[in-house]
Image: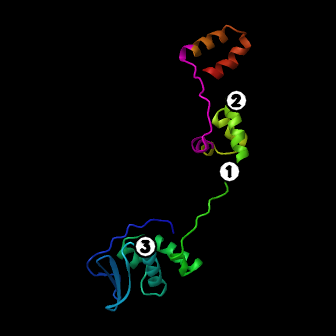
Amino acid sequence: MSKKYQLSFSVEMTKINNKIAFIKKANYVYYYAGGIPVFLHHTDDVNAFKMYICQLYICGSCKQSELAKAFGISKISIKRIVKKYNQEGLSVFFEKQVHHRKYSVMTLDILNRAQEMLNKGKTKSEIALKLKIKKDTLSKALRRVNLVELKRKRQSSKENVKTCSMILDAEPDKNMFINKIYL
């Protein structure tokens, strides 16, 4: 339930259906069933809001479409809230969720091997292919772990022309192969 909701409640009585309505007074949202107040929560308490709309749906007091229309949230969001409740129970709305990171691909061994290859002048693509990791993962490691990437000296266009002309003066068999590389 990590999605952030921007809830805004009307200061006028808003009907969800013929039985259920809500209104915002000060910093609280009051829910009414048949004109009798049955629940309230702070306007910023997203978990209490989710818990109550889940209860309204599960108890059969409201349809998903009625809740979605009244609160301006999607039906799929309501389905996800209900699914989470059915899987984990009421505590899902009140217990702090702990998110566990997945196992890191960039182990110390891989970082060391990547740095060695960088020192030898290998490109990120070559290193990623050799270490069987994604190039993006390697790029993030370069930024986060401060791996040092050697600055590759680019050949100027004059040097490229000079190299090509030197090669063209070489043996004719090699010209065809080298032209494919440089041109």
Q: Quick one: 128 or 72, which is closer to the camera?
A: 128
- Earlier-in-chain disc, 3 versus 1: 3
Amino acid type, label 2: Lys
User: Disc 1 marks which residue?
Assistant: 105
Q: Position of residue 83 (x, y in %)?
A: 54, 76
Is residue 151 magenta-colored?
yes
- Left/right placement of residue 78 relative to residue 88 reads left
The mark total stands at 3
- Among the two numbered marks 2 and 1 on one chain, the one whose residue lies closer to the N terminus: 1
Name the residue located 72 percent from the left edge and 39 percent from the top edge: 113
Question: Between marks 3 and 1, how big is the CA–CA gap?
Answer: 35 Å
Q: Which residue is mark 2?
A: 120
Q: Nearer the viewer, residue 19 or 94?
A: 94
Q: Amino acid at mark 3?
A: Val
- The answer to which quarter of the image holds residue 41 is bottom left
* Residue to which mark 3 is pinned: 46
Mark with earlier residue (3, 2): 3
- Extent of the magenta region: 138-158
In the structure shown, which secondary structural element does the residue marked by tag 2 occupy?
A: loop
